[in-house]
Amino acid sequence: MKAIISFIAVLALAAIAYAGVAMGNMQYLFGVVIPYLAVATFVIFMILRVLKWGSSPNPFRIPTTCGQQKSLPWIKHSKLENPSNVLGVAGRMALEVLFFRSLFRNLKLQTHQGSQLAYGEAKWLWAAGMAFHWSFLIILIRHLRFFTEQVPASVKLAEGLDSFLQIGTPLLYITDVVLLAAVFYLFLRRIGIPQMRYISLVNDYFPLFVILGIGLTGVLMRYFYKADIVSVKMLAMGLVGFNPSVPQGIGPLFYVHLFLICTLFAYFPFSKLVHMGGVFLSPTRVLANTSRVKRHVNPWNYPVHVHTYEEYENDFRAKMKDAGLPVEKE
Ligand code: HEM
């Protein structure tokens, strides 16, 4: 049901953009006003999110670790699993962000030989996650050609590598196929595994359908119903140069693509997708484990009157001796 609600919501969004442009001639609204509003929403609310995260008190070192802490010289230190300095943290973060290292260790609890519980390999989620995120990034890099006067060499290189199979005209991009397949797998996993279906919310399905919609409309524009790329580039350049104009001749399919992208951008700061920024601000990941080397004192500790054992013994020494209790000072 939740999947159906999300699917209908995305279908409705696509229909709104299509009808708005095809019947209502609202190119300026969908091509200029909404993109600016979406980017402004993204920027403002992401900044607010980061400020909120930044203002959370975090006086102690709380990194998650799974290896030997830096200790005595003859005990082997696990530099990546338990980083003791910025370099170690940077290495661990790079492996996490670029290769989803912690997800690679994902395990599945299953029954084995009858009733015996055992942990098994579970790499499909990692593989689909990697495939999805990397293809998304490469597609974004390739799209830079719409936003730059001279297409940068790195973008051309990405295009060349991505289409190296030389299939069809226009050349098939590997990332198009991989992105759609990976997102579809992530959706099937949610509805196919009963436990996953049980915990999945509208907010889990919605981004999947939006991204699927963006990918499908993009693929349709590239391979089936060609968009006027020159006009699209004029529109894109106008938008980034804050001198927007809407060229004629861009079909409604492009505006559906753009509207779904705007939806994704505006929705981003309020959704689980903020993990993109959150991973860099997560104290359990970005702190080095210096909890033994350095004494971390809670800065808002108020002075507490303590009664030391020494004082206690001074107060009760005579009574303690009478009761036969051992004392430290005679
Ligand atoms: C979240 C951002 C975006 C994603 C994930 C995305 C995804 C895609 C995909 C998968 C394709 C299929 C062909 C290809 O891979 O190049 C495509 C094509 C296309 N996209 Fe996007 N897109 C995004 C943003 C944009 C933006 C901002 C524009 C507007 C300037 C745009 C305009 C186009 C056009 C015109 C095509 C057809 C390209 C061609 O015919 O070669 N896209 N998009």
Image (cartoon, rainbow, N blue to C red):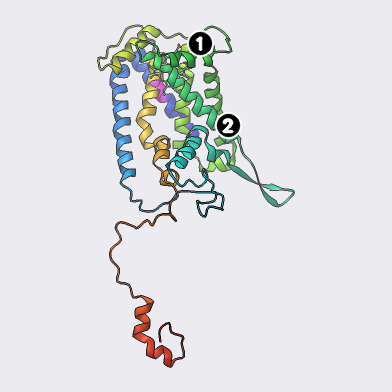
Residue 58 vertical position relative to residue 7 in the rendered view, above or below: below
Which of disc 1 and disc 2 is earlier in sequence?
A: 2
User: Do the residues bearing badges 2 and 1 touch, measured as CB atoms within 8 Å?
Assistant: no
Res. 200 visible in picture: yes
Residue numbers of the magenta segment:
12-16
Residue corresponding to mark 2: 127
Residue corresponding to mark 1: 223
Res. 24 visible in picture: no
Residue 253: horizontal and vertical position, in percent? 42, 14
Foreground residue among 329 and 216:
329
Foreground residue among 330 and 42:
330
- Who's the residue at 40% across and 17% down the image? 144
Foreground residue among 180 and 190:
180
Give the image quadrant in which the ligand numbered 1 is located: top left
Numbered disc 1: secondary structure: helix
Q: Name the amino acid, label 2.
A: Ala
Where residue 20 sits, quadrant-wise, is top left
Counting every numbered tag in the picture gives 2
Q: Name the amino acid, label 1.
A: Tyr
Residue 244: horizontal and vertical position, in percent? 27, 14
Residue at the farthest bottom position: 322
The secondary structure making up most of the magenta span is helix
- Who's the residue at 39% across and 23% down the image? 261
- Who's the residue at 34% across and 44% down the image? 53
Residue 227 vertical position relative to residue 106 in the rendered view, above or below: above
Label 1 residue near ligand 1, CB within 8 Å: yes
Residue 303: horizontal and vertical position, in percent? 28, 66
